[in-house]
Amino acid sequence: MHNFIKLLLRAYDKILAGLVAVISSLSIIILLLITLQVFTRYLTNRPILWTTETSIILMLGMGLPGAAWLLRNDEHVQIDVVVNYLGTKKRTFVNLVTSVLGGITCLFITVAGLWVTHDQYIRGVRTVSDLQVPKYLLLTLIPLGTFFLAIEFMRKVKHYYCKLKEMKGN
């Protein structure tokens, strides 16, 4: 069982790394789309309508997997005004608690997001826009991204729990 979990985590790591590579590529695509939009508006006074909407959709897809990657590498924004004044053990405990709360929140959003996405799929709802994208495709990004975040928070919980156990042993 332990080896199976390690195998799943390795597969997850590869998927997240692949998503980060895709996100990097999407950034370049968004840059090109917005540049195209500006030039067509300036040169022809007739902008290409789908470029703005496509850029927005791509940006939506970039957020949560990118946040999971940042959390994994401790490169996320932290409000550490109070935490910096705590001792190592108390700081580790606070990090443990916030990771547990973050993980629970992300799991809740994942489940709720799956429910809403399924509902939108069943009802066949489309966006009110030029492209009229099926709404469930956009909403799928939320439970997927929060699931990745939940996994990263669970990893943080394990890390801080082990760190606290180690501190008690000393």
Image (cartoon, rainbow, N blue to C red):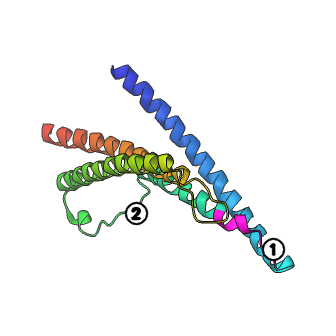
Residues in magenta?
46-53
> Which quadrant of the structure image shows residue 49?
bottom right
| Residue at disc 1, secondary structure | helix
- Residue in front for this viewpoint, 167 or 117: 117
10 or 49: nearer the viewer: 49
Q: Is residue 95 left or right of residue 145?
A: left
Q: Is residue 75 magenta?
A: no
Q: Position of residue 141 (x, y in %)?
A: 50, 50
Side (left or right) of 87 relative to 104: left
Q: Is residue 149 visible?
A: no
* Mark 2: few/some/many CA within 10 Å (<14, 14-19, 20+): few
Q: Along the line of sight, which residue is nearer the eye, 80 or 7?
A: 7
> Looking at the picture, how far across and down is residue 25, in whole percent?
66, 52
Q: Is residue 114 among what the camera can see?
A: yes
Q: Name the residue at 42% across, 58% down.
A: 76
Coordinates of residue 10 in the picture (x, y in percent): 47, 31
Residue topped by disc 2: 77
Question: Residue 164: percent from the left, percent from the top?
Answer: 19, 43
Q: Is residue 48 magenta?
A: yes
Residue 39's label in the rendered image is 1
Whether 19 is drawn above or below 129: the answer is above
Q: Amino acid at mark 2?
A: Val
The answer to whether the residue labelled 1 contacts the one labelled 2, judged by CB atoms less than 8 Å apart, is: no
Q: Quadrant of the C terminus?
A: top left
Res 152 quadrant in image: top left
Q: Is residue 103 above or below residue 41?
A: above
Name above or below for residue 130 compared with residue 75. below
Mark 1 or 2: the one toward you = 1
Q: Secondary structure at mark 2?
A: loop
Tell me the crowding category of disc 1: few under 14, some 14 to 19, or many 20 or more residues within 10 angstroms, Cα based. some
**Most frequent secondary structure within the magenta stretch:** helix
Report the residue at 61% width, 56% height from top: 133
